[in-house]
Amino acid sequence: MKTENVKEKILKYLTIYWTMFKIGITTFGGGYAMVAIIDRELGDRKKWIEKEELLNYIAISQITPGVIAVNVSTFVGRKKGGVPGAICATLGVITPSIIIIMLIAALLTNFAGNEYVKHAFAGIRVCVCVLIINATIGFIKKTVIDLLTIAIFVGVFVVAAFTRIETVYIVLAVIVLSVIYTLIKGNKKPPESLTEQAEKSSRKGGTS
């Protein structure tokens, strides 16, 4: 039984590593493009993570040190397999980049100036934009659901698009405002329904 448990754990960690390795090797365009791939591969296909959880991981990754895609991968691995899972996920997602960079450094002295590479990256950038937009639309459908979230969405978009305020401060401001709103809303008692009012009236009539 113990041997079987060890084999299952090893298989689980190898699966986490290989899954994140495939994400790392097929993603171009930076962290947000990788988030889109993570959402599609781990959320839609494998069902390892919900969109709400992924959004939480993205928010935390914005205000913590490190690359956003690597941080998100670490969180996902931690959820799937604990601390060893987090280590496997992190190693899996960075291994392709290490290999590719070493090959480029060793074999191509003028990689950035190569015409074929320029045209390849021109097409990759367009693909990355589509992936990011597609993931963003999915997140919006899940999170922008009432007047409060619409107001936050519009406010953050305006601040991020037209000012130079750091993202970390925007996220922290939204956290503070959300907590304040929750506290204020929690202190307010919801209005009584007509049924509750009728029940109170009948109880008063019965006691009088």
Image (tube, rainbow, N blue to C red):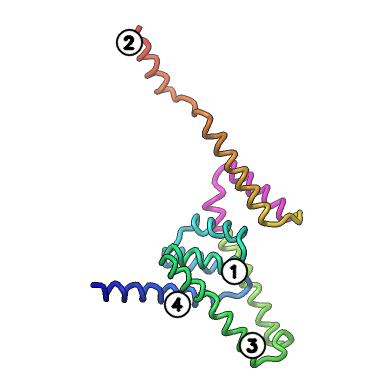
Residue at mark 3 to residue at mark 4: CA–CA distance: 23 Å
Q: Which residue is mark 4?
A: 18
Q: Where residue 104 is drawn, which disc sits there?
A: 3
Q: How many marks?
A: 4
Residue at mark 1 to residue at mark 4: CA–CA distance: 19 Å
Name the residue type under label 4: Trp
Mark 2 or mark 1, which is nearer the start of the sequence?
1
Residue 174, position as x, y percentages in the image: 63, 47
Image depth: mark 4 or mark 2 in front: 4
Q: Are marks 4 and 2 in contact (CB under 8 Å)?
A: no
Q: Residue furthest right?
A: 163
Q: Which residue is mark 2?
A: 206
Residue at mark 1 to residue at mark 2: CA–CA distance: 66 Å
Q: Residue furthest bottom?
A: 107
Q: Quadrant of residue 204?
A: top left
Residue at mark 1 to residue at mark 3: CA–CA distance: 21 Å
Residue 64, position as x, y percentages in the image: 60, 60
Name the residue type under label 3: Ile
Image depth: mark 3 or mark 2 in front: 3
Mark 3 or mark 1, which is nearer the start of the sequence?
1
Q: Which residue is mark 1?
A: 33
Mark 2 or mark 4, which is nearer the start of the sequence?
4
Most frequent secondary structure within the magenta stretch: helix
- SS for dot 1: helix
Dot 2 alpha-carbon crowd within 10 angstroms: few under 14, some 14 to 19, many 20 or more: few
Observer-nearest residue: 122 or 77? 77
